[in-house]
Image (cartoon, coloured by chain):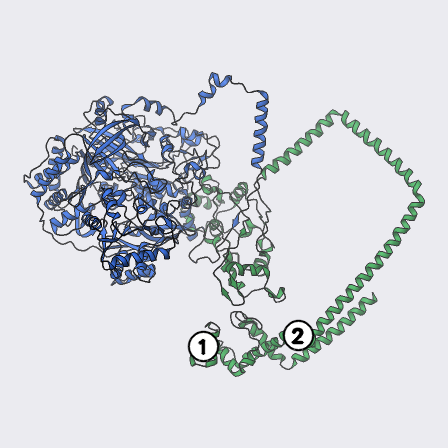
Chain colours: A blue, B green
C-alpha cells in the first residue's frame, strides 16, 4: 500500500515558492541561452562575408596549429634502490590512528592517498568519521603550512630556534618563572612521557589542557556524583530506551562514531528481523543530526533543557524538585511517557544530557542511577580519555601570565586566540609572557601572534600513539617522510630538555616498557594491527553523592538568565569542520551539513515562524547581538527549531587557517561564556534584520521530488504486525511489462541494499567517495549554481507530524501552528545502476552503457557533454564537469594545486571539462578485488570488495555485494520484506534496494 | 696471389712456433693449472679476480704475501683460523671489512694447490702483458698479428694503385673513341629526341581530349589521397615502432637473448602489479657488481655500466656507495593514455599471456621499440579471440561459463565482459 504522507526537501518545496517552481522546471539551474541567440535581434545581426571568411580562416589555422604539437616524451624514472616493500602499482597499508581512532593508511608509491577504518578494530574506536577520512588532504595542505621554523615571522634553522628556545627556558627556570605548555587534551602516552622528560629538566613546567569544545561539566558532575572526574563510556548497544536532552551523541557529542556503531545495533535490519528496536527520544532546541534520527523529537528552548531534566527526575523518582517544566504541553506529555518507558526498561535505558553544565549533568546522573544505567549502559571504569581539558587550569594560567609569573608559554594543538570565549583576555595575558611559542603547523590566529613557531609534522609524518579510552592504545606511525622542514612537537620537547633520543626509539621504548609490558604482543605486532586493547575493566559499584536539590535550584536560576526578551542562542559544533581545526579542509567545507545541507558557511538557524515574525525571508541577513559581541549572519529557516531559539555553529570565521578556510562564515566562539570554570554555550541574544542579502550555498533544494513517493516509512508496531508494512512494493500489486529484454548478469551482479533505519546522515560516505574517486571540490559559488560534484548525496526529507497525526495534505501543513514537530528521513542517493537505465538509451555516443555485471558504465572519453543522460535520469545523480577543476586557476584554493593533487587516487581518471560523471560503484575496487581472487586462483568471497562509502559507514547502512551469490550479506538483506526500490513504478529496474524507515514512536 | 699464400704460410709457421713456446713455458705444471682454472672459475670468480679487487682482494701476489700451507688452510676454512686467533688471518679479515669468505672444506689440498698454481700462472701472464716485448710467447703472437696487418694494408694500397691506373687507361681509351664518333652520336641523339617529344605530345593531347579518362584519373587521385589521408589520420597517436634513444644503451638481446635472463627477474611487477616496472638500479647491481664487461673494453669498465655506477653513486675501486644517487631517466616507450587502465598481472599471471605477444621478440632487440600498435582495436581483437584460462578457480563462479564449457564451446575474454567500457575505462 502506498503511503500518502508528504515529504519535502526544503521549505521552498513545501511552500512552492515562485522561485522554486520556476527553478524546478528546468533540468539545470541556469538555462542555456538559446532564446538570446534565437530571438529577433539575435537572428537579424549581420555578419559581413569578409568577416565570416576571416573568422573561418583564423579558426582553421588556429585549430591546425594547435593540433600540431609533437607527442610529448614521457620519462620513466625507477627507484635507484627500490624499498623492498614497495611494488609500483600496488598499495601499501599502514596502521595508524587519528583522533584516537584506529585507521589504515593506503599509500601508493610512497604517498598516502586514503585513510580507511582499521578493519581489525571493529567494535573499538574506528576511523569512520568524515574528519578522519578527509584528514589525508591536510597533509597536502602545503601552500598554507609552514616549511621552516620561524622566529618573529622569519624562517630560521632548527639549530637557531633550538638555541633561542633553550635560552628562554633556562632564563625562565633560573628566574623561577613557570613554563606552561597549553594543549588540547593529550591522551598519548608517549607525548605525556615526553612532557614528563621535559619536566625532569625544567621542573617548573606545567601542562594545561584546554579544549575549545569542553566537556568539563561532565567531569565535574561525575566528580561530585561519584568521586570520579571522568567522562564515562556510553554503551548504547545495551540501551533499549535512549533519551537525550540536547546531546548530539551520534554526531559531535563525545565519540559520535562509536556511539553510532553501538546505537545502530538495536535499530538496523538485523535487529528488526529479531523483532527488537530501541526507542530514541530527543529533546533539543536546534535540529541536530541525532534529533533527525530520533523516534520522538521534542523541540525545547535551551532554557527549558534544565527543566526537562528536573521534570524527568521528578517523574522517574516521584520527587518534586523545584523548576519543573511549565508551559510546554507537548514536552510535558512526552516526559511522562518517557519516564514510564525508562522505568519499564530499567538497566536497559539511558539519559544523556548535552549541555556542558555541571548541574544538568548531575541531574542526568541522578536519573541514570534511578533507571539503573550505571554498569550496563554507562561505564565509569572504562572511561573516555578524549576530553580532559579544564577551563579552571586555563584560567589559572591566564591569571599567572597576567601576574608575570609565566616565563615561557608553549601552545600545542591549541589556538585560544581563535577559539577561547574571550580572546582579548588571552591576548593581554600573552603579552606579559617573556617567551611564547606555538607548535602549530601554520601561522594560525595564535601562532602568528607569538614569538616563535616550531612547526610540528602532520600525523602521517610522525611517530606517536593515542589512547582515546581506558585500556585502548593506538599507534601513530608515519607513512611518508616529513615533506617540509618540520619536526614533531615531542621531538622538539626532547631536544630542548637535552634528551638525545630519536622519536622512533622513544615511542618504541614507551610501548615496550609501559603499554606492552606483560602482554604477549611485541612492538612489531602493534605496528601491524595498529592498536593494543587491554580489555574491559570490571565495573565497580558507585554510590551517588550528588546534590540534586542544589542542581535543580541552580538550573532554575540559569534558565532565568537565558529566558525573556529576544532569542536563546545555542552554539553547536559543525558536523563537518568540528571545532574549527579542519576549517581549511576543502572536502569538509563542501560536505553539506547533515540537516540543513548548507556548505561553506555558518548561519543562524531559526524556526520558519520566527523568521516570518521578524519579517525576514529567503537570503536575509541578521545581526546577532549578545554577550558584548555582535556578528552579521545569514538566516536559515530550519524546521524543527524550537520557537524563540537560534542556533549557530562554531568553528567558522577563521582568519589565518589557509586559503580555503579563511573568512568562511563568522566566529561564534565569543558568544560562549566561562562560568564557574565551565564553558556555557547558550546565550541570550538580540536578532535584528540587516538590509543586505546573502545566499547560502545549499544543496538541499537542487532537485525536486515532484511529490513522488520515494520515501517509505512505517512504525515499529506496524512492522511487527507486517514486516512489509508501508514498503509499497509496486511489483506486489501490478503486472509489469517490458520494452526491453531482460538484462543477463551471468557472472557477478553488483547490487547494494541501503538500510534507511541505519543511516544517520552523517556524510562520512560522501567524503570517502570524494577522495576515492577524485571528485573535485567546486567551491561556494559553484554550489550555489547547483554544480556540486558529489557522486553520492544524502537526501534529507522532512515530514510533519503534530499531535500524533501525520499531515498529508499541503493545506493542512500550511495551517500548522509552528514548524517544531518535523520528522526527518535521510536517504543516501547515488547512481542506481538501473538494468533498464534511461540514461543509456539517450546517449548519442554510447558513452554510458551497461555491463554484464549489472553496472552502468561511464566512458569519460567517449562523452562529449550533451547532458541528455542527466536530463533523463530519474534520480538526478549524474554530475557534469563545468570546468577543468584540476587545472583551472579559479579553483586554486581547492584542487588546482600541485600539492593537493598528490591526494589523487592513481587508479581513477580525473575527468575533464564537458564530461558527465556519476557513481561507478567503485569499479576500480571491484576490478582490483576480482583480480586479487584470480591471482590467488580462488572464487571471490563475499566481503572481499568494499566500496569507499560502505567501508566507512560505522552504521553499516550500505550493504554491497554480489546478488548472484545467494549467501552474500546483500542477497540476504535484499530478501528483507522492508526492501523497496525508489521509483520502481517506472520500471527502470534499479539495482539499489532501500529498506523502509521504521520509527518506534509512542503513538503506535 | 702468390704473395698471399706465402704470407699465410709464414703466419702458420710463426703461430706454431708461438704455440710451442707457450706450451714450453706452461709445461712444468700444465695438469695442475688446467684443473685449477676450472675450479677457480666455478668456485672463486664470484668474489675474486687475479688482477682486480672484486668482493675479495685481488689475488695476484698472494703467494708472495703468504706461504702455500697457510693459503690452503685459509681457503679451506678462513673463519676457523680467525676464530683460532691466527694474527695474519685476523689482520686480513679486518683489512677486508670483516667480509666472511665462504669455507671450501670440500676441496682437497691438491685441488687448492692447483688453484694457487693457476693464479700464479695468470699472475705471470698479467705481468708479461704490460711489459711489451719482454716475454717471448705473448709478444711473439702479437708481433705476428701486427706484421700480418701491416703487410695486408700495404697489399691493399698497392692493389688500389693498380686499379686506379687501369681505370685511368680505360677512361682515356673511351674518350678517344667518343671524340672520333662525335658527329654520328649527336645526329642519333637529335633523332631520338624529336620522336620522344612527338610521342609525349600526342599522348598528352589524346589524354586531355578523353574527358572520361581525365575524370577517371582525377577520381583515382582523389581516392588515393583519401585512402592515404585516412590511414594517416588513423595512425595519429599510434606510435608503433617508436624507438627512442635511451640514456643507457641497454641491450635486451644480450640480457634476455644471449644470457637468457627471465623477464620477471627485472620486471617483477608484471606478475603481481598493474605496472611491469622498470627495475631499480639496485637490481642491475646484483650482477653488475661483478660483471663489468671489461673484457670488451681493454680491461676498463664498460662506459654503459659506468652509467649504472653513477646512478647508484658507486665507486668500483673502493667498492663503496656514496650519498648522491641519481635516478636513471629512461624514456618511456609504451604509453597508454591516462583514461585506459591496463593491468599487467591480469594478463601475465591470470591469462598467461607471453610477454612477447604484446612486446614482440624483445630477446632479439638491441634497442627496444614499440612492437604493437597499442590501439583499442588491437586490444579488442585480442579479447575477442583469446580463450579464458578456465583452470583458475575464480571462474567456477561464472555459471554460464560452466555451461558453455560443458557444451564444448570456447569461452573468450569478450564473452565474460572483456569488451565492456568499464573494464578498462574508469
Residue at (15%, 50%) from the top-left corner? A375
How packed mark 1 is, by other alpha carbons closer than 10 Å (few <14, some 14-19, many 20 or more), is some
Return the disc, 2 or 1, that comes first in the chain's sequence.
Answer: 1
Q: Which mark is residue B131?
A: 2
Q: Residue A83: percent from the left, percent from the top?
A: 44, 57
Residue in front for this viewpoint, A388 or A341: A388
Residue at (8%, 46%) from the top-left corner? A547
Is B281 on the left or on the right of A107, as rendered? right
State which chain disc 2 sits on. Answer: B
Q: Is mark 1 on a helix, strand or loop?
A: helix
State which chain disc 1 sits on. Answer: B
Disc 2 and disc 1: Cα gap in Å?
38 Å
Quarter of the picture containing the N terminus of chain A is top left
Q: Residue A750: percent from the left, percent from the top?
A: 37, 41
Is A968 on the left or on the right of A225, as rendered? right
- Which quadrant holds residue A296? top left
Q: What element carries label 2?
A: helix
Q: Residue A683: percent from the left, percent from the top?
A: 19, 36
Q: Residue A836: percent from the left, percent from the top?
A: 40, 32
Image height of B71 relative to A10, above or below: below
Residue placed furthest toward the right: B180
Q: Mark 1 points at which residue?
A: B79
Are discs 2 and 1 less than 8 Å apart at CB?
Answer: no
Residue in front for this viewpoint, B117 or A696: A696
Q: Can residue B69 be seen in this view?
A: yes
Residue in front for this viewpoint, A206 or A329: A206
Amino acid at each position: 500500500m502506498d503511503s500518502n504522507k508528504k515529504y519535502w526537501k526544503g521549505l521552498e518545496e513545501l511552500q512552492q515558492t515562485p522561485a522554486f517552481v520556476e527553478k524546478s522546471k528546468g533540468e539545470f539551474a541556469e538555462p542555456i541561452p538559446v532564446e538570446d541567440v534565437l530571438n529577433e535581434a539575435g537572428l537579424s545581426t549581420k555578419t559581413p562575408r569578409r568577416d565570416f571568411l576571416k573568422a573561418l580562416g583564423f579558426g582553421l589555422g588556429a585549430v591546425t596549429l594547435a593540433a600540431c604539437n609533437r607527442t610529448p616524451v614521457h620519462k620513466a624514472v625507477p627507484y635507484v634502490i627500490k624499498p623492498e616493500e614497495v611494488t609500483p602499482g600496488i598499495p601499501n597499508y599502514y596502521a595508524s590512528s587519528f583522533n584516537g581512532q584506529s585507521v589504515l593508511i593506503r599509500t601508493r608509491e610512497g604517498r598516502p592517498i586514503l585513510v580507511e577504518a582499521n578493519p581489525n578494530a571493529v567494535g573499538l574506536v574506528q576511523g569512520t568519521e568524515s574528519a578522519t577520512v578527509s584528514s589525508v588532504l591536510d597533509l597536502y595542505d602545503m601552500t598554507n603550512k609552514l616549511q621552516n621554523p620561524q622566529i618573529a615571522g622569519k624562517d630560521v634553522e632548527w639549530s637557531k630556534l633550538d638555541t633561542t628556545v633553550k635560552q628562554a627556558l633556562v632564563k625562565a627556570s633560573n628566574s623561577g618563572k613557570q613554563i606552561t605548555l597549553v594543549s588540547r587534551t593529550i591522551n598519548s602516552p608517549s607525548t605525556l612521557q615526553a612532557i614528563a622528560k621535559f619536566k625532569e629538566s625544567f621542573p617548573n613546567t606545567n601542562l594545561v589542557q584546554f579544549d575549545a569544545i569542553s566537556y568539563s561539566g561532565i567531569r565535574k558532575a561525575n566528580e561530585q556524583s561519584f568521586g570520579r572526574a571522568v567522562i564515562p563510556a556510553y554503551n548504547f548497544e545495551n540501551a533499549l530506551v535512549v533519551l537525550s536532552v540536547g546531546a548530539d551523541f551520534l554526531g559531535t557529542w563525545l565519540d559520535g562514531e562509536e556511539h553510532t556503531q553501538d546505537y545502530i545495533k538495536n535499530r538496523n535490519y538485523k535487529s528488526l528481523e529479531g523483532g527488537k528496536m530501541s526507542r530514541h527520544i530527543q529533546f533539543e532546541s536546534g535540529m541536530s543530526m541525532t534529533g533527525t534520527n530520533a523516534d520522538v523529537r521534542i523541540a525545547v528552548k535551551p532554557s527549558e533543557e534544565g527543566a526537562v531534566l528536573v521534570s524527568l527526575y521528578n517523574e522517574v523518582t516521584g520527587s518534586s524538585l523545584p523548576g519543573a517544566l511549565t508551559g510546554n504541553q507537548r514536552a510535558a506529555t512526552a516526559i511522562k511517557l518517557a519516564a514510564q518507558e525508562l522505568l519499564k526498561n530499567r538497566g536497559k535505558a539511558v539519559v544523556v544530557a548535552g549541555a556542558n553544565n555541571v548541574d544538568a549533568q548531575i541531574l542526568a546522573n541522578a536519573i541514570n542511577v534511578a533507571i539503573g544505567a550505571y554498569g550496563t549502559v554507562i561505564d565509569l571504569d572504562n572511561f573516555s580519555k578524549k576530553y580532559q581539558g579544564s577551563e579552571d587550569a586555563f584560567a589559572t594560567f591566564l591569571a599567572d601570565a597576567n601576574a608575570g609569573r609565566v616565563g615561557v608559554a608553549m601552545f600545542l594543538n591549541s589556538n585560544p586566540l581563535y577559539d577561547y570565549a574571550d580572546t582579548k583576555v588571552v591576548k593581554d595575558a600573552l603579552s606579559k609572557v617573556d617567551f611564547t611559542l606555538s607548535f602549530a603547523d601554520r601561522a594560525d590566529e595564535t601562532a602568528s601572534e607569538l614569538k616563535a613557531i616550531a612547526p610540528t609534522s602532520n600525523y602521517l609524518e610522525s611517530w606517536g600513539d593515542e589512547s582515546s579510552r581506558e585500556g585502548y592504545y593506538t599507534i601513530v606511525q608515519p607513512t611518508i617522510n616529513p615533506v617540509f622542514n618540520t619536526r614533531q612537537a615531542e621531538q622538539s620537547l626532547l631536544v630542548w630538555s637535552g634528551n638525545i633520543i630519536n622519536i622512533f626509539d622513544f615511542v618504541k621504548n614507551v610501548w615496550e616498557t609501559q603499554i606492552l609490558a606483560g602482554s604477549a604482543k611485541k612492538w612489531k605486532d602493534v605496528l601491524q594491527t595498529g592498536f593494543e586493547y587491554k580489555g574491559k575493566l570490571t565495573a565497580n559499584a558507585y554510590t551517588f553523592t550528588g546534590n540534586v536539590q542544589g542542581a535543580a535550584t541552580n538550573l532554575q536560576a540559569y534558565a532565568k538568565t537565558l529566558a525573556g526578551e529576544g532569542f536563546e542562542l545555542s552554539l553547536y559544533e559543525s558536523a563537518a569542520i568540528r571545532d574549527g581545526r579542519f576549517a581549511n579542509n576543502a572536502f569538509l567545507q563542501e560536505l553539506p551539513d547533515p540537516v540543513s545541507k548548507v556548505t561553506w558557511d555558518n548561519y543562524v538557524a531559526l524556526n520558519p515562524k520566527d523568521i516570518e515574525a521578524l519579517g525576514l525571508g529567503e537570503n536575509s541577513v541578521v545581526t546577532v547581538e549578545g554577550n558584548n559581541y555582535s556578528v552579521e549572519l545569514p538566516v536559515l529557516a530550519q524546521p524543527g527549531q524550537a520557537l524563540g531559539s537560534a542556533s549557530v555553529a562554531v568553528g567558522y570565521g577563521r582568519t589565518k587557517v589557509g586559503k580555503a578556510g579563511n573568512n568562511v562564515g563568522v566566529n561564534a566562539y565569543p558568544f560562549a561564556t566561562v562560568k564557574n570554570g565551565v564553558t556555557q554555550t547558550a546565550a541570550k541574544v538580540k536578532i535584528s534584520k540587516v538590509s543586505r542579502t546573502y545566499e547560502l550555498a545549499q544543496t538541499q533544494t537542487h532537485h525536486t521530488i515532484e511529490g513522488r513517493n520515494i520515501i517509505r516509512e512505517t512504525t515499529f508496531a506496524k512492522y511487527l504486525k507486517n514486516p512489509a508494512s508501508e514498503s509499497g512494493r509496486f511489483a506486489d500489486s501490478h503486472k509489469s511489462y517490458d520494452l526491453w529484454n531482460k538484462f543477463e548478469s551471468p557472472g557477478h551482479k553488483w547490487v547494494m541494499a541501503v538500510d534507511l533505519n541505519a543511516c544517520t546522515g552523517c556524510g562520512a560516505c560522501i567524503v570517502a567517495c570524494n577522495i576515492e574517486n577524485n571528485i573535485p571540490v567546486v567551491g561556494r559559488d559553484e554550489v550555489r549554481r547547483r554544480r556540486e560534484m558529489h557522486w553520492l548525496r544524502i537526501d534529507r526529507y522532512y515530514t510533519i507530524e503534530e499531535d500524533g497525526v501525520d499531515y498529508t495534505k499541503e493545506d493542512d501543513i500550511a495551517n500548522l501552528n509552528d514548524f517544531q514537530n518535523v520528522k526527518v528521513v535521510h536517504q543516501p542517493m547515488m547512481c542506481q545502476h538501473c538494468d533498464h537505465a534511461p540514461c543509456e538509451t539517450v546517449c548519442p555516443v554510447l558513452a554510458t552503457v551497461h555491463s554484464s555485471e549489472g553496472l552502468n558504465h561511464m566512458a569519460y572519453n567517449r562523452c562529449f557533454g550533451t547532458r541528455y543522460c542527466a536530463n533523463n535520469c530519474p534520480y538526478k545523480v549524474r554530475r557534469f564537469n563545468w570546468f577543468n577543476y584540476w587545472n583551472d586557476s579559479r579553483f586554486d584554493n581547492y584542487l588546482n594545486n600541485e600539492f593537493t593533487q598528490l591526494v589523487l587516487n592513481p587508479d581513477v581518471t580525473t575527468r575533464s571539462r564537458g564530461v558527465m560523471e556519476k557513481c561507478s560503484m567503485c569499479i576500480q575496487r571491484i576490478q582490483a578485488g576480482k583480480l586479487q581472487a584470480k591471482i590467488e586462483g580462488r572464487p571471490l568471497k563475499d566481503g572481499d570488495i568494499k566500496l569507499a562509502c560502505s567501508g566507512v559507514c560505522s552504521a553499516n547502512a550500505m550493504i554491497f555485494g554480489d546478488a548472484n551469490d545467494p549467501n552474500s550479506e546483500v542477497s540476504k538483506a535484499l530478501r528483507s520484506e522492508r526492501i523497496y526500490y525508489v521509483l520502481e513504478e517506472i520500471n527502470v529496474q534499479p539495482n539499489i534496494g532501500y529498506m523502509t524507515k521504521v520509527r518506534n514512536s509512542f503513538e503506535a | 696471389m702468390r704473395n698471399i699464400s706465402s704470407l699465410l704460410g709464414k703466419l702458420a709457421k710463426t703461430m706454431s712456433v708461438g704455440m710451442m713456446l707457450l706450451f714450453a713455458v706452461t709445461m712444468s705444471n700444465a695438469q695442475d693449472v688446467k684443473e685449477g682454472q676450472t675450479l677457480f672459475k666455478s668456485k672463486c670468480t664470484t668474489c675474486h679476480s687475479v688482477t682486480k679487487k672484486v668482493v675479495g682482494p685481488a689475488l695476484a701476489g698472494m703467494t708472495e704475501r703468504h706461504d702455500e700451507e697457510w693459503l690452503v688452510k685459509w681457503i679451506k676454512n678462513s673463519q676457523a683460523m680467525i676464530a683460532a686467533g691466527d694474527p695474519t688471518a685476523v689482520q686480513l679479515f679486518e683489512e677486508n671489512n670483516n667480509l666472511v669468505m665462504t669455507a671450501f672444506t670440500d676441496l682437497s689440498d691438491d685441488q687448492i694447490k692447483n688453484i694457487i698454481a693457476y693464479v700464479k700462472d695468470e699472475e705471470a701472464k698479467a705481468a708479461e702483458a704490460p711489459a711489451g716485448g719482454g716475454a717471448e710467447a705473448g709478444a711473439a703472437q702479437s708481433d705476428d698479428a701486427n706484421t700480418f696487418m701491416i703487410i695486408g694494408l700495404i697489399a691493399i694500397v698497392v692493389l688500389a694503385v693498380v686499379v686506379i691506373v687501369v681505370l685511368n687507361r680505360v677512361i682515356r681509351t673511351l674518350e678517344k673513341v667518343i671524340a672520333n664518333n662525335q658527329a654520328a652520336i649527336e645526329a642519333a641523339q637529335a633523332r631520338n629526341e624529336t620522336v620522344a617529344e612527338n610521342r609525349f605530345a600526342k599522348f598528352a593531347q589524346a589524354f586531355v581530349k578523353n574527358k572520361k579518362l581525365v575524370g577517371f584519373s582525377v577520381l583515382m587521385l582523389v581516392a588515393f589521397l583519401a585512402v592515404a589521408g585516412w590511414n594517416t589520420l588513423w595512425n595519429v597517436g599510434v606510435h608503433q615502432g617508436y624507438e627512442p634513444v635511451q640514456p643507457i644503451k641497454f641491450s635486451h638481446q644480450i640480457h634476455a637473448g644471449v644470457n637468457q635472463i627471465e623477464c620477471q627477474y627485472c620486471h617483477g611487477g608484471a606478475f603481481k602489479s598493474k605496472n611491469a616496472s622498470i627495475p631499480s638500479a639496485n637490481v642491475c647491481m646484483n650482477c653488475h657488481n661483478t660483471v663489468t664487461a671489461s673484457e670488451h673494453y681493454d680491461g676498463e669498465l664498460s662506459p654503459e655500466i659506468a652509467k649504472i655506477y653513477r646512478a647508484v653513486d658507486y665507486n668500483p675501486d673502493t667498492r663503496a656507495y656514496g650519498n648522491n644517487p641519481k635516478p636513471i631517466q629512461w624514456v618511456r616507450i609504451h604509453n597508454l593514455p591516462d583514461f585506459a587502465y591496463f593491468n599487467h598481472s591480469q594478463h601475465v599471471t591470470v591469462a598467461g599471456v607471453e610477454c612477447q605477444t604484446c612486446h614482440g621478440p624483445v630477446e632479439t632487440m638491441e634497442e627496444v621499440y614499440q612492437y604493437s600498435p597499442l590501439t583499442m582495436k588491437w586490444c579488442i581483437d585480442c579479447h575477442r579471440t583469446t580463450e579464458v584460462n578456465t583452470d583458475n578457480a575464480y571462474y567456477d563462479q561464472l555459471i554460464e561459463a560452466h555451461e558453455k564449457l560443458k557444451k564444448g564451446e570456447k569461452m573468450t575474454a569478450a564473452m565474460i565482459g572483456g569488451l565492456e567500457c568499464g573494464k578498462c575505462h574508469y
